[in-house]
Amino acid sequence: MTLTEKVAYLKGLIEGLQIDESKPENKIIKAMVDVIDDLALTVTDLEDEVDALDEYIEEIDDDLAAIEDIAYEDDDYEDDEDVEDDEFEEWDEDDDEEDSEFYEVMCPHCGEVVYLDDDIDPTCVTCPACINKFDITEDACSPEDCEGCSGCSDK
């Protein structure tokens, strides 16, 4: 039984009882039933609107899915989901080399802090921020000073 059907049943009961509307308490009961009837109609209208909006959203979702299929047709977007988890190596703190040391050096050109490990050639360091090369053993690095360095000879 819907909400409006329940209110109609309630109205029928009140009319069937032939309530005397001259008494104040009966006027209140009749007025309350009228308010409940209005609320039931409003709720029914809102339910209809929500149903219509649900259908509209489903249509938009279907259209968006079609657009995504077209947009990602040439990409390997869907292939990424097929990669199995065991193909990725999980990072473990124990995997890090414990005897590897890192050095913090400031670029003399731009002031950016550069982190170096002990495998880097200290005579020719390339700053990732400004792409300038410098020697951490001296104040500056030039191609003439470190001709053996592949980084400086490229410049």
Image (cartoon, helix red, strand yellow):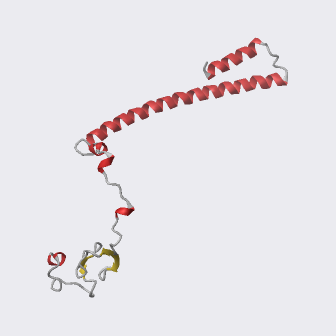
Tell me how many marks there are. 0
**Residue 113 visible, this orientation:** no
Q: Residue 71: x, y in percent?
A: 27, 43
Which residue is found at the position 68% from the left and 26% from the top?
Answer: 36
Which residue is found at the position 24% from the left and 41% from the top?
Answer: 73
Residue in front for this viewpoint, 39 or 115? 115
Task: Look at the picture and state if 101 lies above or below 146.
Answer: above
Which residue occupies the extreme bottom position in the image?
A: 138
Q: Residue 135: x, y in percent?
A: 25, 83
Residue in front for this viewpoint, 60 or 109? 109
Q: Quadrant of residue 59?
A: top left
Placement of the N terminus among the 4 image quadrants: top right
| 143 with respect to 48 (left or right) | left
Placement of the C terminus among the 4 image quadrants: bottom left
Q: Residue 149: x, y in percent?
A: 17, 78
| 33 with respect to 92 (left or right) | right
Which residue is found at the position 27% from the left and 86% from the top?
Answer: 137
Which residue occupies the extreme right position in the image?
A: 23
Task: Look at the picture and state if 138 lies above or below 115.
Answer: below
Which residue is found at the position 34% from the left and 73% from the top?
Answer: 99
**Residue 83 visible, this orientation:** yes
Q: Quadrant of residue 41?
A: top right
